[in-house]
Amino acid sequence: MKLTTKIFIGLILGAAVGLALHFWAPDLFETLDAWFFNPLGTIFLNLIKMLVVPIVFFSITLGVASLGDPKKLGRIGGKTIAFFLVTTTIAISIAISLAYLFQPGSGDFDTSGANYESQEAPGVVETFTNIIPTNPVQAMTEGNMLQIIAFAIFIGFALAMLGRKTEGVMKLVEQGNEIMMFLVNLIMRFAPYGAFGLLASAIGTMGLDGAAAMAAYMLVVLLALFVHLVVVYGSAVSILGKMNPIKFFKGFFPAFTVGFSTSSSSSTLPVSMKTAQENLNVPKPISSFVQPLGATINMDGTAIMQGVATIFIAQVYGTDLAFTQLVMVVIVAVLASIGTAGVPGVGLIMLAMVLNQVALPVEGIALIIGIDRLLDMTRTAVNITGDAACAVVITESEKKHGISEQKPAEQIAE
Ligand code: ASP
């Protein structure tokens, strides 16, 4: 049986078992969750998380070093960021339009007990200046993705410039990358069981609580995610990437399911890179550069949730947003989704920033927090698909410049 099928079965079985226990044997669920489901899921999560920092470092260094020339890097970087910004803006616009069309917040909602402590979101300038790490080792121990990316770009650039002189280090980075990719393959064999554990634990804990009351909101978010996935990524991949969208979605499906079960773009990164390189023929230098960056700053699914949630909360509290405020929502949600770390639940924390901007009550978050776990899974899967779509598009557009699959060490040896 194919791995993808196995993961999918793991997901469905996990959800079914979790749901059944939630309703019929909650006590049994607690014991099973403590001793089996939760540990099983956590082991899988830890296994892939273990690889994230070394993979980001090795692969970006290697990617930048093999691109070699800074002009090429600038061109790919520019196109990547443009793709991220445009798709995220489209994502929020779809979300806002659907929220206006379906009015999920027009029913009766009890807001009297709503209570939500918002966390301080970092400022825009601070976020930008912090990209440069003052201590790269600390950035790695803290898992600060943007800082690790910045450091790796510098090292990769230096390796490219120094050529023969640093051949040894180049080999080390290359082989380090090989080791990591080998381990991803190994760990993925455990993915079906991990997905089972994660789903059983999550669904068993929350059941369908709150889902009925929040059905309209959930459906609008899911619909917007679906439209974005199929229409925007589907057409980007086929028109700009010259790839059959069905091949794209099928090829990327293993990573999609892992994103869904882990709710974390950054934990899924090792798997999504491997999947894009092997199933979607994205050359390593492009995948290594586009996907880690995307997993950190490109979150269309998150932006969609933030867009729908903002309009939903405005409707619940009976506030009309003027057109200029809507434009503000789009701009701030793009920034908020960029600032969202690729770990579970952060999108909801960053939502406070959007609500503050248009003077909506942050307490509104209390209404949607209960069902956010399920939506987090779905939006994370969409988030990482966006990065893969970008990688496919960049691959096509770089063809005319001849991106080489040649190993950097061979280039140096020549
Ligand atoms: N969990 C999401 C991700 O990792 C971020 C979020 O929206 O909370 O992509």
Image (spheres, rainbow, N blue to C red):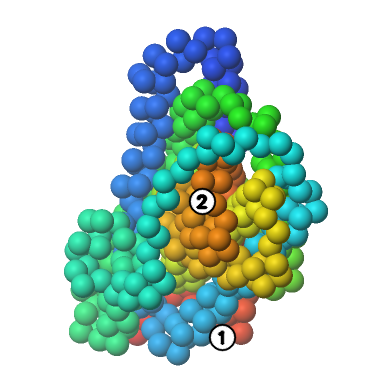
The total number of labels drawn is 2
Q: Which quadrant: the N terminus? A: top right
The residue beneath circle 1 is 401
Q: Is mark 1 within 8 Å of ligand 1?
A: no
Residue 318 percent location from the top left of the image: 69, 50
Residue 138 appears in the figure: yes
Residue 208 percent location from the top left of the image: 61, 26
Instruction: Farthest residue to the right: give it.
Output: 101
Residue 194 percent location from the top left of the image: 45, 33
Q: Which quadrant: the C terminus? A: bottom left
Q: Secondary structure at mark 1?
A: helix
Residue 370 percent location from the top left of the image: 54, 35
> Which numbered disc covers residue 103?
none
**Of 194 and 263, the residue lying toward us:** 263
**Of 350 and 399, the residue lying toward us:** 350
Above or below residue 17? Residue 344 is: below
* Residue at image point 54% right, 75% down: 80
Q: Secondary structure at mark 2?
A: helix
The quadrant where residue 6 appears? top right
- Please state which amino acid type lies under the numbered disc 2: Val
Residue 171 appears in the figure: no
Q: Is residue 290 left or right of residue 331?
A: left
> Which numbered disc covers residue 362?
2
Q: Is residue 320 left or right of residue 176?
A: right
